[in-house]
Amino acid sequence: MSPLNGIKIIDLSKVLAGPLCAQYLGDLGADVIKVEPPVQGDDTRAWLPLRGGESASFMAVNHNKKSIALDLKSPQGKRAFRRIIADADVVIQGFGSGTAKRLEVDYDSIKALVPDIIYCEISGYGRNGPLGTEPGYDVMLQAFSGMISSIGQAGGDPARVSFSPVDLGTGMHAVSGILAALLEKQRSGQGAYVEVSLLDTAMGYMGYMAHNYWASGKVPSRMGTAHPSLCPYQVFDTQDGSIMLGVGNDRLWKKFCETAALQEYENDPRFATNADRVANFQATCDLVAEKMRTRKTDEWQKALLAAGVPVSPIHTLADALNHEQVQARNIVVKSEHATLGEIPHIAYPVTLNNQPRDAKLPPPVLGQHSREILLQAGYSEAEIETLITEGVVEQHSGV
């Protein structure tokens, strides 16, 4: 299955949210053209670490795309862009407020050229409201939304979520919005303006915590790895390390007590139900912590898994990537990069009909496909050479 086969996506976005969205649409079979400024390209191309001059961050969210390096500030670049998008289905952009209009790639300008276009705009705080013109950054929205205030050790400093979840989540929401718009277009023939923002994504992440706040009047606080509604549900030290324990209900509490030789506490009125354990949070954690320190991590892992109690070692990323379960899922795939040779990728986290995952195209080098894209748009070789000579277009040398 390649459900988006024949769908043409124009990716004007940069950094993480928009590029991830376009990459996932490419994973689903769409033809994705990434439009970048000449010389520097997408901002993430300069992010460290670099491998052979190519940014790891860029490569993480830009496979299954072709790249054209095109100066959208020049009249010739604007004309070329209009020819490229003439048969496009979707445009994705995440420019700062006012930039898209200045470049003539805003929704109204594109819709005038392609009336049934699906246009996805990504912004920091949304385009309305008092912060509608402010730029958005993942960590700022983590802070703004209350996320950072709830993360970290109790009594300690707040902590940032390390992997930019607001950016990545916004990209995922953009995928679902675009897919919904494509379905609507099939039915009605109408395009759509799809809007996503880092703010909306961040507040969406805080949804169940917001309901807890509305119900209890208590603002979420830092609890380390613990959970405000479940107990024991956190990391505990073992004899030789630490382990994540997830006693998510009373049935699992009984299984845990039997496995840990704590049967006498199974029906203790302080611990018998989850509500009891949450009400006696510290006493529950102290009881479990003392017991968990009596065995090694591997011993607990085997015993608790055999009993059906959720438990996990605290892996590093390297541990996870090398784990046999991750390898069995084929979530790591490889492609042949133009300058680096074979490189690995984290694949699209969805499979259809048990098809093997792959990356059909590697992340492009800047301007790798400029000539090919312009030829498809009806330019002659001579016209393309003129654009390259004038600096309107950059074609990667040697490709």
Image (tube, grey):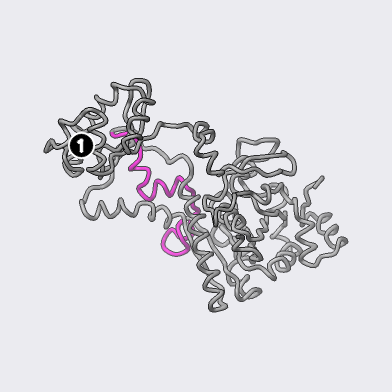
What residue is shown at x 41% (from left), y 63% (from top)? 129
In this rendering, position of residue 19 left or right of residue 264: right
Q: Position of residue 95 (x, y in %)?
A: 57, 58
Q: Nearer the viewer, residue 372 or 69?
A: 372
Q: Position of residue 99 (x, y in %)?
A: 59, 60
Q: Is residue 164 magenta?
A: no
Q: Is residue 127 magenta?
A: yes
Taking 172 as reference, is 47 above or below it?
Answer: above
Q: Which residue is tagged 1?
A: 281
What residue is shown at x 56% (from left), y 77% (from top)? 190
Mark 1 Cα shell of 10 Å, populated few (<14), some (14-19), many (≥20): some
Q: Secondary structure at mark 1?
A: helix
Q: Main secondary structure of the magenta part?
A: loop
In this rendering, position of residue 23 left or right of residue 314: right
Q: Nearer the viewer, residue 186 or 212?
A: 186
Amino acid type of the residue tagged 1 in the rendering: Phe
Identify the residue at the far right of this view. 382
What residue is shown at x 55% (from left), y 57% (from top)? 353
* Number of numbered tags placed on the structure image: 1
Please state the extent of the stretch shown in magenta in the rendering: 125-154
Taking 180 as reference, is 137 above or below it?
Answer: above
Q: Nearer the viewer, residue 99 or 260?
A: 260
Identify the residue at the far front of this view. 306
Identify the residue at the far bottom of this view. 188
What residue is shown at x 65% (from left), y 52% (from top)? 64
| Quadrant (top left, top right, bottom left, bottom right) of the N terminus | bottom right
Q: Position of residue 274 (x, y in %)?
A: 20, 43
Q: Position of residue 364 (x, y in %)?
A: 70, 48
